[in-house]
Image (cartoon, coloured by chain):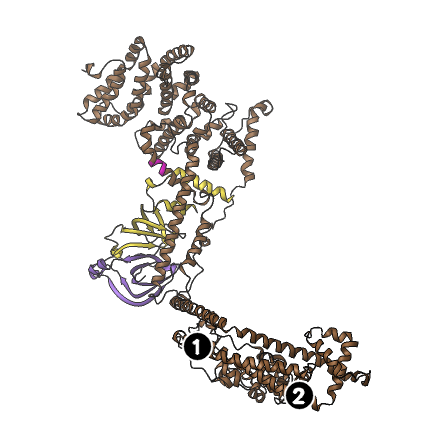
Amino acid sequence: MLIFSVFKTLTDQTVTVELKNDLCITGVLKSVDQYLNIRLDAIKVQNADQHPHMMAVRNCFIRGSVVRYVQLPASAMDTQLLEDATRRESGKKI
Amino acid sequence: MSFFGFETSLPQHQDTGQNQAFAEEDVAVYTWGDASYDTLGDALQEAGDDLNDETFGSGPVGKDFDFSGTFDNTRQPKPEPAPSQNIPSGLSNGNNAWTSNAATSVLPKHVHPSGSAAAPSVFSRIDPLLAGRTEPKQVAAAVHPPVDAPFMIAGDYASQPRTMAEIEADMKAAAMQQQQLAQQRERARILEQQQMLAQQQQQQQRLQEEERMRQEQQEKLASIERERLLQLERQARSDPLWAIRQAMMEQKIGNQGHVHERNQSIPSEASPMSRNRQPMIPVLPSQMPHAAPAQQQMMLQELLYHQQQQQQFLEQQLHAQQHSEKSAEVMADAQRRIQEAEILEAKHRRRVSKIQSMARYNDLMTQSDKDFITRVQVAQLVTSDPYADDFYAQVYASIKQQRNASEINLLKLGSAGASTQGNPNQRGPHRRENAIQRMQAQVERLVNNMKSRELSKEAGAPHGPLANVLGKTSGRSYKAAPRQLLQIAIASPESAKAHPVKEHEAEKAPEHIPSHGNQAPPPFSRAEALLIIERLFTNILDMEQLRRNKPLAEEQVAIAAWNEKQQALLDQIWQGLRVAGNLHETNPHPFIALIAPLKGKRFIGRLGRDLTDNQKVMALSVIVTLIDQVDVIRNAAILDSVEDSQDRRFVERQAYAFQEHVINQGLQLSPASRTLRVYNSLIEFMLENGPVFSRVMRTRPGLTLLEHFFAEAALLKHGLQGPDGEVISAPPEDIAKWDKLYDRLFDVLLPLWTIMFPSSRILPAFPPDSMEIIQVSLVTDGFDQPVWRFLAGFALEGTVEQHSRLVTQLRAKVMGTLKMAQRLEEGKAKARKIRNVDLFLNALGLSSSQIPLQ
Amino acid sequence: MEKRVLLVMQDGRVVMGILVGWDQKSNIILSECIERRFSLESGAVDTSLGVYMVKGDQICLVGELDTGVDDATQWSEIRAEPLPALRYGET
């Protein structure tokens, strides 16, 4: 479960989650489960003046199925290692 | 006790205590009005229920066995329903069963529908035999109606063979003893009672009851014996058959061995008795007819049998008496039992209270249950190889850890040239340790998370009225982890391996060129190259995995096998790189084609520590010889543009990767192999093809490559600082060769210098003296800087004569740059321009400030 | 548990309520639900809904409500486009 493994390393990093309803939520990644449901703390909705709906929400649970993108902090990623990991993953399936 | 929610007490003794019922109840009760009743009910032990509470708990019975659903949540026992309502009719009331004529009843009462009237007689006939030893009262009862108890009468006759005097004496003595004992015991009992009353009423009651029972039994026994003695006397006198029977018995003992055998267990007293009796009736045997009726013989056998039974019964009673003689012991025993009972009682109370306090968690798992399951689940996650399923997180964490550590260590150790991942030999075991530690921490965290979640669930559950109303889905299990949904058929290993075979053939192909004509095999397409690189990456991963599992140094056999495996993998990788082989096999060369993609360049960088210096030199030779085939050189023209474009950025990245991953990392020679000779020959290779060289020198990557070799060579020429401080200089012949090579290089490069500056290639496109050219030159200054630097380094090695030639050659360039700088306002841009020029001028001992500008 | 949460559903509706139950499939039960309807024409309008059981696959996001901020906000003054429904694929 590579993607799970990757998200584990991103715990406590600030990520931006773009939802399929075009909402972009930036927050501190607290946990990701096997459905890739995401828990964010200290959230901030981008374009807050257009989306005041969640003004009173500080942390949230995002259902994995509604996530379109997760913007990861480049500094917390090792792309070469990610390549290797995908190689391993694909190698396992053969 | 009420088990299973049924009321087990029958209507007849519902209101009597168990012991009382024992003495008073109607015998027929146990037949339950059924002729076929097997009387097993009588075998039920009604006594000894005192510890039932201990066993089953005395509290209100839980709902566990409440199949009838009569138990309500308030745990208040319901008033006992009327037996006729609650108990199956066949069990509760025989008459009911009969009158109802239930055809569906499973009870065996219909097997002998001879009427309930037969039941009592059957019971009373059988019961004494079954219960006679334990219930003397019934024995007595059976004795009285001789018609209904023929066996007992027979048994009474059987006790005859003793002399009356003996029996009488025995019985009297026994009676006397009993009387005394009874009195003694009564006194003891009162004493006991007083002591007990102070302490334990319940135990006392029980003991009292027992004592009374025993006493009653003994008194009854005494009366039975007395009665029987009287009866025996009476019968002996009145029965005419008595003498005959006596004689027959004597005869049997003498003549019929089998009977004797059958009665071997007759107490030994019996035979002396009969022998004693013999002289009393000496005439009888001769008077008796030898052919006695069979019936008589049968009767005699029965007599003997029952005599034996009686004898045993008496002995038991005597034994019991002897036992009870030790009343002091009994008392001590009683005391001890009281204490034991007290302890048990206390334990029991504790347990009951605990059970009750835990009852509210009855339908929940205990915390330890949950923990256990969590442990099992977590244990499944922890494999011997945490890299298998959690590769990224594991390695990422260890790299990060190392990076943090090396940031500190870097300054101390100065581990320059170390790849980002450090030395694999140091890393292997270290990383494994880290992994284990991290895994432990992780497991701990998982368990804690689980715990806290369960806790919060527990805490939340009673309050959340709707908890679990959604129903429970199959428990949270790791099996629920998402599975691979797309089963894309990946090229099978066979097809993957087919390629090397093909390559192998291709490798051989040049040897057969005559037969194949001039048809060269096609070079690798980009896709092919990428595929090969991927396979090589897989090999590298295999190798890294192998290194993680390096056996301990002590296991020499394993180490040897491990080394072999590693070498095989390295060989495979080297073969895969296709460095060796015909240089002009394809265009581009297979190796050059492989390093064309960014991935290929990175692969070389990654491989740096695994290639031998020999292999590196070979690879470098291929690169410099076929440098015009190298993608970054071919595409370098794109770099001579100041406009930002995707292509440019792409080539820029490639050029950087080529320099960084291929030259600086992958093919960087170890210090021991860095000799002047190697660099001499590499530069020589570059110079070999003049036109190509001049073209290559107009590219930034080409120039950088030459600069790299030149810098190394120059360094080596001047000698290296050895470990002891002395200067290790290169062999003189190499230095001589180098000097010659430098002169040659100087001559080749001299006309090229002006064009080597990117600005010289870019700026002419713009109108001179325009503001635009100034702006563009600001960008090209950045490109020019490496050339100025190389020029400076190159000039340093030259002679004075060469210096003047250089100045002559480059005067225009220097002047042009300085003029451009003059037009700029003071600032960073201007300073940079001047600094670039000064790099070169300073190397010659000059300065831009000395140059007069009109 | 027992916390006021804000639910954004896949069709863009915003429902707030007390979280009283949920399961692994993120099915959720809310009590004392209030739907908050946003519009540009007038301020947000709250409608009481009672107990709501929401199927997990209709849920987009569940956020813990900061009741302090929520109470302090004059929602009837706030005008905003209702949240869009989920959109799959490119526009």
The three-letter amino acid code for the residue at tag 1 is Leu
> Left or right of B785: which side holds B167?
right
Name the amino acid, label 2: Glu
Q: Could you say which is closer to the camera, residue B7 or residue A91?
A: B7
| B627 and B227: which is toward the camera | B227
Q: Position of residue B805 (x, y in %)?
A: 30, 10
Residue toward you, B622 or B169: B169
Q: Position of residue B159 (x, y in %)?
A: 67, 82
Which quadrant of the figure has residue B471?
bottom left
Query: For residue B401: magenta?
Result: yes
Measure the C-alpha gap from mark 2 to mark 1: 41 Å
In the displayed structure, A80 sits above or below B234; it is above
Above or below, comparing residue B567 to residue C17 in the picture: above
Q: Residues within 10 Å of mark 2 (few under 14, many from 20)?
A: few
Q: Which residue is mark 2?
A: B233
The circle drawn on residue B191 is 1
Task: Identify the mark at residue B840; answer none if there is no mark.
Answer: none
The residue drawn where x is 36% and y is 57% is B453
Residue nearer the viewer, B721 or B21: B21
Residues shaded magenta: B400-404
Give the colour chain B carries in the figure: brown
Report which colour depicts chain C. purple
Q: Colour of chain A?
A: yellow
